[in-house]
C-alpha cells in the first residue's frame, strides 16, 4: 500500500461515524439480550453489511454504543471468520473446502476459480469484484461441490459452470 | 443449480407413527408454515404440555423416553435437563438451541430448520416450559441464510398466534425466543464456546465444571440442546413413551428415530429419518443405492468428520451408539460418508486436518500446535516427501491430542479419523515417506 492511500485511509478512519440507521439497528439488536456486549457480532455485521468490511474507525464507535472497551470489540472482530477487517471485493465467493466436497471435486473447482480470477483463498481480484474464501461444510453434502456467492448457494456445478456463474455477479 | 434442502426425505413414504420428525415435509420442499403445521397436528404436544403436564412431568417423560442428544455426543437429554437447579432458585434461566451445524458431512439441522421451523419452535417452547426457562436463543451459523429467514417468519407467526411471548395459550407461561446468527468458526458449536460467542466474546470453550446447567450464559442456569434433539420433544409429549420405545429396530439400545444419511460417490446421496438400529448396509445399499458405477467402497465414516473410518466389512454394524461403538468408533451425527477407491487416504486426511487446524480456537497448546504439525507432515507425505518416522509422529500426535488431553473435544475429534485411517491404511501413509538416498543405493 502506498503512503498516499495509507494517509487517505487514516483520514477516512478518523471520520468514521455510524449512521443513524446503523445506530438504530445496533440498539435494536441490543434489546434482544440482557447485556449489550452480546450484540457485538450483530453490530459488526450491521456495519459490514453497509461498507462491505469493518473499517478501523467503526471499532471505537461500536464500542461506544455497547459500552465496552474497543479492544474487546477488536478481539471479537478478529476472531470470527465472516467479519472482514480489510476491504474485500463487491462479491464474496465462499467455496466449501470440507471433506465431502473434497471427494466431490473441490480441487477442480478451486483450480478453475484460481485460473479465472487469478487469486487464491483469502485474496481479492485487482478490480475489487471478487474475494475468494474457504468455508466449512455448507450442509449440501449430497449436491456435489458447493459454494456461496454472497447469500446465494449453489452446488452440483462443473468447474466450467462455476466460472460461468461468476458472470451473473457484476 | 440454486440449492435448497429438498431431497429424498421429501418424497419417501412417511407416516406420523414412524417418522415423527419428517412426516409433515412437503413433496415440493417448501417450508411448512403455521396453518399447514397445525392442520398436521402441529402444536398438539405444546397444548398437552401446557394443559395437562407439570414441568417435572415433561422432564420425566423426556428422561423415560431415553432421548439422547443428536448434536454428536449422545448425552441423555433427560439427564442433562435434570442437572438444571430447582426452578425456585436462580432466575432467569436460558434454553439455547445449538444450530451451528458446521461439522463436515452434517446436513440434517439445515433441512429441519428450513422446511420444518415450527417443529423446532414447538420443541423449544415445551422444553423451556420443562426447564422453567423464560428466554431462548437459536444459535444459527451465519451462512444458513434461508434457515434464518424461515425461522424468523415462523417465530412471527407463532407470536401472532399467541404460541410465543407472554401468557402462552393462556397458560401463564412466558417464553421469548430469538434467532442469533453467528459469524463463522466451527468451534462455536462446542456448547461452552457457543455460550461465550452468544455473550459477544471470542468463542473459546469454558472449563467445566461448572457446567452450563449451573453457570451458563450470563452466569445463569442454561441448557444447550441440538436442533434435532429439541425437534424430538413434541412427538414424545404428544404420543408418549410406549410409542417412542416402539420406534427403534430390535437390538438397538437407543430409542426413536435419527436423521441419517450417506454422501460421497454413492448413487443416491441423501438424508432420511430412520429408526435407530438399521444396519449401515441398509442405509448404504437400500437408501443410498450403493456406489456409483465405476467406483467401489474403500472406507466409510459413520457420523461426521470427528468419527473414525471403518471398512466395508463394518457395514453390518447397527446404527446406534453401541452398535457403532462395537466396531471401534462413534455414531457422531449419524450422517455417513463413503470414501471411494479413487481417493487417497493421505490426501483426504490432509484435507480434514487442514479443516481441524484452521478451526482450532488456539486456546490450548496440543491442539493449536499439534494440528498444524499434522498438516505439515500429511502435506509432505502427500507429495512423497515424508521423512522416516513421520507416520510414528502422526501416531504420537493421535495420542497427545486424544480424549482428556486437551481443553475441549475439538482435538480428540480431529485425531480420531487420523488414527483410524493409519490403522486401516498404513501402507498408503508409509508410501509417502521418501526413499532415502542411502536406501535407494542399496535397493
Ligand atoms: C468442536 C465441537 C463442535 C461442535 N459443533 C456442534 C454443532 O455444530 N451442533 C451441535 O448441536 N453440537 C455441536 N457440538 C456438540 C456440543 O458441544 C453439545 O454436545 C451439543 O450441543 C449438546 O446438545 P445435544 O445434547 O442435544 O446433542 C460440538 C462439539 C465440539 C467439541
Ligand atoms: S482443544 Fe482446540 S478448539 Fe478446544 S480449547 Fe483447545 S485449542 Fe481450542
Ligand atoms: S462438505 Fe461441502 S457441503 Fe458438506
Image: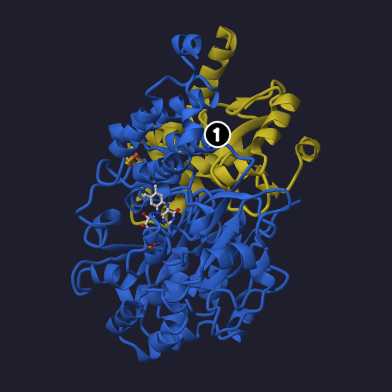
Chain colours: A yellow, B blue
Relative to B8, residue B420 above or below? above
Foreground: B313 or B84? B313
Q: Residues within 10 Å of mark 1 (few under 14, many from 20)?
A: some
Residue at left 66%, top 78%? B13
**Residue A24, how many percent across, how many down?**
51, 49
Residue at left 75%, top 37%? A159
User: Which residue, given by chain and number where applicable, does mark 1 sit on?
Assistant: B347
**Disc 1: residue Cβ within 8 A of ligand 3's nearest atom:** no
**Residue B262, how many percent across, how many down?**
59, 58
Q: In the rendered image, is residue B169 in sight? A: no
**Residue A122, how many percent across, how many down?**
57, 28
Q: Quadrant of residue B187?
A: top left
**Residue A11, how many percent across, how many down?**
53, 18
Q: Quadrant of residue A73?
A: top left
In the displayed structure, does residue B41 sit left or right of residue A148? left
Q: Residue furthest bottom?
A: B52
Ligand 2, what quadrant?
top left
Number of numbered callouts drawn: 1
Amino acid at each position: 500500500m502506498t503512503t498516499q492511500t495509507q494517509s487517505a485511509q487514516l483520514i477516512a478512519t478518523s471520520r468514521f461515524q455510524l449512521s443513524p440507521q446503523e445506530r438504530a439497528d445496533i440498539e435494536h439488536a441490543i434489546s434482544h439480550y440482557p447485556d449489550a456486549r452480546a450484540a457485538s457480532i450483530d453490530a459488526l455485521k450491521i456495519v459490514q453489511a453497509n461498507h462491505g468490511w469493518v473499517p478501523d474507525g467503526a471499532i471505537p464507535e461500536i464500542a461506544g454504543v455497547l459500552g465496552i472497551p474497543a479492544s474487546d470489540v477488536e478481539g471479537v472482530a478478529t476472531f470470527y471468520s465472516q467479519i472482514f477487517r480489510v476491504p474485500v471485493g463487491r462479491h464474496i465467493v465462499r467455496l466449501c473446502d470440507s471433506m465431502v466436497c473434497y471427494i466431490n471435486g473441490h480441487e477442480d473447482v478451486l483450480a478453475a476459480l484460481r485460473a479465472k480470477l487469478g487469486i487464491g483463498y483469502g485474496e481479492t481480484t485487482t478490480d475489487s469484484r471478487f474475494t475468494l474464501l474457504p468455508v466449512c461444510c455448507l450442509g449440501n453434502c449430497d449436491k456435489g461441490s458447493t459454494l456461496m456467492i454472497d447469500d446465494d448457494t449453489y452446488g452440483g456445478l462443473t468447474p466450467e459452470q462455476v466460472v460461468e456463474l461468476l458472470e451473473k455477479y457484476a | 443449480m440454486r440449492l435448497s434442502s429438498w431431497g429424498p426425505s421429501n418424497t419417501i413414504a412417511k407416516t406420523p407413527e414412524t417418522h415423527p420428525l419428517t412426516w409433515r415435509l412437503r413433496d415440493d420442499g417448501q417450508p411448512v408454515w403455521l396453518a399447514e403445521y397445525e392442520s398436521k397436528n402441529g402444536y398438539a404436544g405444546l397444548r398437552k404440555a401446557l394443559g395437562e403436564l407439570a414441568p417435572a412431568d415433561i422432564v420425566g417423560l423426556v428422561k423415560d423416553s431415553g432421548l439422547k442428544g443428536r448434536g454428536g455426543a449422545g448425552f441423555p437429554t433427560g439427564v442433562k435437563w435434570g442437572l438444571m437447579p430447582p426452578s425456585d432458585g436462580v432466575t432467569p434461566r436460558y434454553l439455547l438451541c445449538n444450530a451451528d451445524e458446521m461439522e463436515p458431512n452434517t446436513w440434517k439441522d439445515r433441512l429441519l430448520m428450513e422446511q420444518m421451523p415450527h417443529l423446532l419452535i414447538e420443541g423449544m417452547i415445551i422444553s423451556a416450559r420443562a426447564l422453567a426457562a423464560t428466554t431462548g436463543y437459536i444459535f444459527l451459523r451465519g451462512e444458513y441464510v434461508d434457515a434464518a429467514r424461515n425461522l424468523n417468519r415462523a417465530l412471527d407467526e407463532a407470536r401472532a398466534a399467541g404460541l410465543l411471548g407472554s401468557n402462552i395459550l393462556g397458560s401463564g407461561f412466558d417464553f421469548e425466543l430469538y434467532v442469533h446468527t453467528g459469524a463463522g468458526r466451527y468451534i462455536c458449536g462446542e456448547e461452552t464456546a457457543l455460550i461465550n460467542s452468544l455473550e459477544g466474546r471470542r468463542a473459546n470453550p469454558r472449563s467445566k465444571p461448572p457446567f452450563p446447567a449451573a453457570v451458563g450464559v450470563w452466569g445463569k442456569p442454561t441448557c444447550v440442546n441440538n436442533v434435532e434433539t429439541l425437534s424430538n420433544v413434541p412427538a414424545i409429549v404428544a404420543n408418549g413413551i410406549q410409542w417412542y420405545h416402539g420406534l427403534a429396530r430390535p437390538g438397538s439400545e437407543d430409542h426413536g428415530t435419527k436423521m441419517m444419511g450417506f454422501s460421497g460417490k454413492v448413487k443416491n446421496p441423501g438424508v432420511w429419518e430412520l429408526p435407530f438400529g438399521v444396519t449401515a448396509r441398509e442405509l448404504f445399499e437400500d437408501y443410498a443405492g450403493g456406489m456409483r458405477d465405476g467406483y467401489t467402497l474403500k472406507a466409510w465414516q459413520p457420523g461426521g468428520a470427528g468419527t473414525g473410518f471403518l471398512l466395508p466389512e463394518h457395514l453390518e454394524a447397527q446404527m446406534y451408539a453401541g452398535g457403532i461403538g462395537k466396531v471401534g468408533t462413534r455414531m457422531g451425527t449419524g450422517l455417513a460418508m463413503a470414501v471411494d477407491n479413487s481417493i487417497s487416504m493421505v490426501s483426504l486426511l490432509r484435507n480434514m486436518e487442514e479443516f481441524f487446524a484452521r478451526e482450532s480456537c488456539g486456546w490450548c497448546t496440543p491442539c493449536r500446535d499439534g494440528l498444524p504439525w499434522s498438516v505439515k507432515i500429511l502435506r509432505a507425505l502427500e507429495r512423497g516427501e515424508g521423512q522416516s518416522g513421520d507416520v510414528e509422529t502422526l501416531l504420537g500426535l493421535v495420542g497427545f491430542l486424544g480424549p482428556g488431553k486437551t481443553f475441549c473435544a475439538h482435538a480428540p475429534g480431529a485425531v480420531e479419523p487420523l488414527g483410524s485411517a493409519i490403522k486401516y491404511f498404513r501402507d498408503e501413509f508409509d508410501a509417502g515417506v521418501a526413499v532415502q538416498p542411502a536406501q535407494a543405493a542399496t535397493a
